[in-house]
Image (cartoon, rainbow, N blue to C red):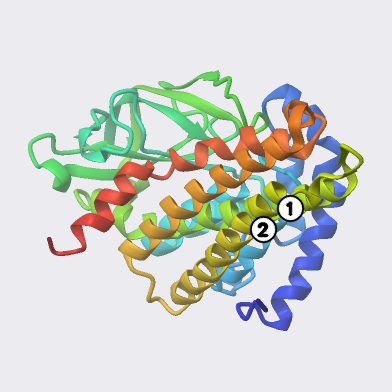
Amino acid sequence: MRRELFEAEHEAFRETAKAFIAKELLPHQEEWEAAGVVSREAWVAAGKQGLLGIAVDEEYGGGGVDDFRFNVVIDEELVNAGISGFGSPVHTDINLPYLTRLGTEEQKKRWLPGFCSGEIITAIAMTEPGAGSDLQGMRTTAVRDGDHYVLNGQKTFISNGINADLVIVAARTDPDAGAQGISLLVVERGMEGFERGRNLDKIGQKSQDTAELYFNDVRVPATNLLGEEGQGFIYLMQNLPQERLSIAVAAIASAEKVLEITKQYCRDRTAFGRPIGKFQNTRFELAEMATEVQIGRVFTDRCVADHVRGELSVEHAAMAKWWLTEMNKRVVDRCLQLHGGYGYMMEYPVAKAFLDSRVQTIYGGTTEIMKEIVGRSLGI
């Protein structure tokens, strides 16, 4: 089906994103996979190309265009190129809204120019060793002491955690207030007591630096509080739909890409004297996947369109996140099977996609949590 989501300016931007990825990211992919982290030079290059601050007002060095479809274009082209480690979706899709919507004028002037140039890389720290999707179970605390908060705690599985210069940290400022006692503090590189643990060794997304973070009596200036004290949980709930939609966008793009690769493989690979695509079982497998992928594409684009209009509901974002990531997991697994033994070899893109996409049903809220959100909305 013909996509109706994009305008001419988005497609022109797509060519810019493709050219940047081909020139600045793809040649270094193997090097970054081995190192477990993308070089900071790549971030600066992305900033120079105008890829990091599209939605930021021009006065802070951004593009001044608040249109999530540009984010979608970048996310899709990263997937199409097999780039899973460059953490710009975390930076722009997830973290940016916190800074633009909650930041004071002073904070915006201090942080957004570097955010747009790639000189400041951001992360968000919600997950803890004992609190993943259950954000209300977090134990990190921030106690007010004069003009500072004293921050103590530990976070884990933090994307961009090694490279990050700014970390948006969710912490309890009132331990007795439940969800109303959570606040957001911005911790900056170099603050005393802020330490990074190891770069975690994952089964996929190898070049995406994912770290443990430790906060030991970190004195965070009160001027680094994002929004109002005690409103952090509400802010997280307001921004999570865009995060989950971003994950869904990557999931459907992955399913489409892997399906195309597999269709070509089934045309070229022969068994028993004919292409494996000529066997009925193969055709049925491909037909089922093509149908699911097409349905997923239509729903994703509708969710993006709703989001651009400010109409995407929490429930629809949760639906998109759980169903599309689970569908992608099924599609990649079935495509690997159709590749046979070659699908298990890392030189084939389907193998990397198999490893890279597995985490999508976990981060941003597990499938089970997404179903709980949808279930609660049904009024049963």
Q: Is residue 94 left or right of residue 217?
A: right
- Residue drawn at x 62%, y 32% as measured from the top left: 355
Q: Is residue 359 left or right of residue 370?
A: right
Residue 110 visible, this orientation: no
In front of the other: 377 or 282: 282
Mark 2, residues whose alpha carbon is within 10 Å: few (<14), some, or many (≥20)? Answer: many
The residues bearing labels 2 and 1 have C-alpha atoms spaced at a distance of 6 Å
In front of the other: 245 or 198: 245
Q: Position of residue 166 (x, y in %)?
A: 50, 40
Q: Position of residue 157 (x, y in %)?
A: 46, 29
Q: Position of residue 94 (x, y in %)?
A: 48, 52
- Residue drawn at x 39%, y 64% as measured from the top left: 101
Residues tagged 2 and 1 counted as in contact (Cβ below 8 A): yes
Mark 1, residues whose alpha carbon is within 10 Å: few (<14), some, or many (≥20)? Answer: some
Q: Is residue 332 left or right of residue 31?
A: left
- Residue drawn at x 70%, y 52% as measured from the top left: 259
In front of the other: 24 or 290: 290
| Label annotation for residue 80 | 1
- Residue drawn at x 44%, y 54% as measured from the top left: 323
Q: Amino acid at mark 1?
A: Asn
Residue indicated by mark 2: 76
Q: Amino acid at mark 2?
A: Glu
**SS state under label 1:** helix
